[in-house]
Image: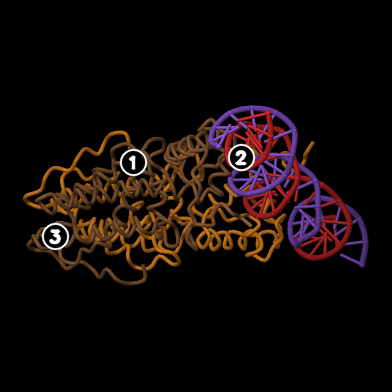
Chain colours: A orange, B brown, C purple, D red
Amino acid sequence: MDTRRVDEGPDAAKPRPLRRDAELNRRRILRAGREVFAARGLQATLNDVAHHAGLGVGTVYRRYPDKQALAEAVFAEELDEIAAMAQEALAEGDAFAALAGFLEKSLERATYNRGLRELMRHGTLEGTGLARARGEIASRCERLVARAHAQGVLRDGVTGADVVPIAAMIDAVMDLSTERPGEMWRRYLAIILDGLRARPDQAPLRDAGGTG
Amino acid sequence: MDTRRVDEGPDAAKPRPLRRDAELNRRRILRAGREVFAARGLQATLNDVAHHAGLGVGTVYRRYPDKQALAEAVFAEELDEIAAMAQEALAEGDAFAALAGFLEKSLERATYNRGLRELMRHGTLEGTGLARARGEIASRCERLVARAHAQGVLRDGVTGADVVPIAAMIDAVMDLSTERPGEMWRRYLAIILDGLRARPDQAPLRDAGGTG
DNA sequence: TCACAACCGGATACACCATATCCGGTTCGT
DNA sequence: ACGAACCGGATATGGTGTATCCGGTTGTGA
């Protein structure tokens, strides 16, 4: 029997604070994870992360039972930062510029973050600890789009759900170039944004629903 | 000394025709390769192909020393078919419709062909047997674009080199949906095409050159 | 200062996978 | 009918990512 927790509530689950060195290492691991996943993508190994953090593999595995756990911790932070960008965009006056600016800023951040890009390409995130942040981003995109529609600057039929595919498309352009992504993607984002703008003579945009 | 080839030219390199059964199997393999690469992508194994062809692994390895060899044979055919589509498009009167139609048709073909999509995403193809077909497609795209410019229907600054990134973008949309690609990509192709169309008030398209 | 729990390191066991070969048996071509 | 060409697929090989284990070290509270 474990007597140390006898006075905590039934399901307290309050993890005792880490020893000082352990806590320091936890941060090191998180930071290394961010850097390694950004540089080499999600396929990077916990061994890679450990080495990059200057720690042993065992140390990493003790703190994060597997890659999934570390990845969730890392990307929860990053997605929150993107959610914050969306929030800022909601403050801008020109709704089209707000939407465009959000896309540009968030994609710019993704440029040198392979892990983030792989994540947003495979989408779902259901059942992971990232669902909350993802939902927040989605709902803010929805509002961004609604605002633009209200101002009449966005083509009829455009939806908040269009943001993810657009991001995926730009990501594909970044992937195209060997080595570093470069700035080519901005060209294509511009093209897409022009296709999204409301125009007088416009043909109706085809249905958003369907098989995928 | 090999007396059988004594009267062929210095570097004749004319492979003796295959035995009937071997030739039959060669075709079976090629066909199976097409189907398997289309369904499961380039990561499919030669063992997979062999099984799908109803043949032993050894049979496949004898004909095609490795996956690369088979893949080149398979995709040379497929790229030639796409090159033919571009050729047809060059005959159409309306140059914008021709370009749009070519993109739509070729991407439609890619929809259910994972291997083809992976190929066009990674691009280069340099140093493979596919470089020729790729070059043919590229030059026809160039002509398609030039024609559209001549008719004044294409936005200033659009290049033949834009075709590959556009294809990559649509491919990314197809990848987004779990399971079969569906028809969603047509929506985004429409958006992009609208962004490509010449318009009176248009801002100049940003530079095509650069780091990638 | 001491004692012990918590922690560290990284060699290593494990499981998985694609690749490619080898060779006894079979079929084709002459 | 004879030999060359061919077939089949079990299996050797090498590489990779995952996760554990345990002897040695360090932080912490008494």
Element under disc 3: helix
Badge 3 amino acid: Arg
Q: Are marks 3 and 2 on the same chain?
A: yes
Name the spot of residue D18 as percent of width and height, x first: 65, 47
Front: mark 2 or 1: 2
Q: Please rate how many residues cluster around mark 1, counting C-alpha atoms within 10 Å: few if below 14, some from 14 to 19, many from 20.
A: many
Does residue B19 lie above or below B95 as drawn?
Answer: above
Element under disc 2: helix
Badge 2 amino acid: Gly
Per the rendering, the mark at residue B111 is: 1
Name the spot of residue B89 as percent of width and height, x first: 18, 49
- Front residue of this view, candidates A97 and A111: A111
Q: Give the residue number, with chain letter if any, for mark 2.
A: B58
Front: mark 3 or 2: 2
> CB of mark 2 within 8 Å of CB of mark 1?
no
Q: Give the residue number, with chain letter if any, for mark 3.
A: B147
